[in-house]
Image: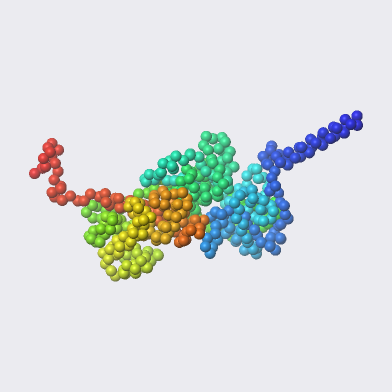
Amino acid sequence: MIIRERTGILALGVAVVVAAVAAYFLGDRSKSNRIRVPWDHPHVERDLAIVKRDTLRILVLEDPLSWEARPKAVSGLEYELLERFAKGADLVVKTIVVTDPDSMFMDLQNGAGDVIATQYVPRSEQQGWVACTRPYHSVRPMVARLREDPVATSQAEMELTSSMAISRWSPFLEEFRNKGKRAASTFAERHGTPEEVLMDVLIGRETAAVVTDAVAGYEAERFPNVEFTSLDAPARPLCFAVRTNAPELLGALDRWLSDEKEVAFRDAAIASYQGRPLKNGALRKRAMPARADSISPYDEEFRVNGGGFGWKWQLLAAMAWKESRFDSSAVSNKGAQGIMQFMPRTATHYGLDSSLAVADHIHAAKRYIARLDTVWMRAVPDREQRLRFVLASYNAGVGHIIDAQRLAERLGLDPKQWEHNVERAVLLLSKPRYFTRPEMKNGYCKGSQVFHYVRDIVSLYDQLTGLRSKPTPKEAKVSDPGSTKPVE
């Protein structure tokens, strides 16, 4: 009898232990669907008092809306907000860049970091892991994809899958995981940051990606070949997160987030990261008002001074219209002058000043383009493609275009093809993660300006060379519809 009782007690004890182990590793799935992991609870005691004696350690994502390093400066929306909080609380700030969500939580719980600032939205499986501040902003999902392009894309891009890429850091990951299970459309989870996933769309590695409207607002002007379309889904609140045993730090952050002056500052800071929204649709093809017998007030000067350099004189006319709208007195906000908008240093090299005639400026532009053509002749043998590199160099300088060509090759794009290849790489030279690479020798470049410049002038050149000349009186004679003889 005693043996039976002891056996029963032993069996009951084993059952309790098994249940406890199962509860630890599986959690109460009926309540929160949680899985216990080593980083789901604090491993240190480190609240505001200790942080004040030490540093406020911010866990950031390398992304322009979180944290971004550039030469002699650091930016990033969330970083700038928390830097302002730290200044008001007399705290020293240190940033720690994280590359994996799991290691991010472990860094927080171990005390390597104190605040998560990664465009964070808590997910159901993370319930109880961290304490979240009140929201500082809310975002909605959008789809980023390449615009319809009058210049044909490659066959490889046409064969990409129809799935939408989504970063594992996305505020909408949980929602789209569930949606992907219920719907026919597929969502491919990617390890990269939201910025990296968007870059994969830009260079043609992904067909489409789910991003936030904040990302769309920030990137739209930088990437004119990408369009952003709203998705029918609810907004998600972004917040900061701290350890669950840091109530003083959490309280200080919440009070700061609710302060009226800080709300106004935060709204202004968020607005500064939002650019001018662009209309969706196909990439533009530029045209200009012109007739075959009258392109500009300076047609004779273009004919006399703009021919005999490998391309027709209409190329310089197209450039002059794009540069100055044929205004010989035009001066840009960067100091470029004249009908061809020479920068002062280049103008001096070619012996130009504002007092010289328009013909002198046109002739100098012809000489400059001929020199650029020589620069690119070996690197880009195809004459039509070389014209694009010449135009890009005229606009941004040879150094930036060499950087773009080198970057295109690193990204698996064709360094000898402009459209869909080097023109995409030049867009990336506005991003610190690309223009600060050791092999990039010339730094930041406003790639969207170069992108439009080349496309616009090629389009204008095609338009102008396609105009039919005004027929002479002899050419104007038409044939009699009922006869093969010319009308007398």
Provide residue 265's location: percent of width, then percent of height.
56, 59
- Which of the two residues, 276 or 434, is positioned nearer the viewer here? 434
Position of residue 97 in the picture relative to residue 368 (left or right): right
Q: Which residue ends up furthest to the left in the rendered image? A: 488
Screen quadrant of the C terminus:
top left
- Which of the two residues, 31 or 455, is positioned nearer the viewer here? 455
Does the rendering let one see residue 92?
Answer: yes
Provide residue 418's location: percent of width, then percent of height.
39, 51
- Which of the two residues, 333 or 467, is positioned nearer the viewer here? 467
For the image, the number of numbered tags is 0
Write the residue at 63% across / 53% down: 116
Provide residue 104's location: percent of width, then percent of height.
63, 51
Figure check: 49 above or below 192: below
Write the residue at 35% across / 49% down: 285
Position of residue 472 in the picture relative to residue 34 (left or right): left
Figure check: 19 above or below 445: above
Provide residue 409's location: percent of width, then percent of height.
45, 52
Write the residue at 60% across / 48% down: 121
Position of residue 204 in the picture relative to residue 75 (left or right): left
Residue 386 figure quarter: bottom left
Q: Which residue ends up furthest to the right in the rendered image? A: 2
Write the residue at 59% across / 42% down: 174
Residue 374 figure quarter: bottom left
Screen quadrant of the N terminus:
top right
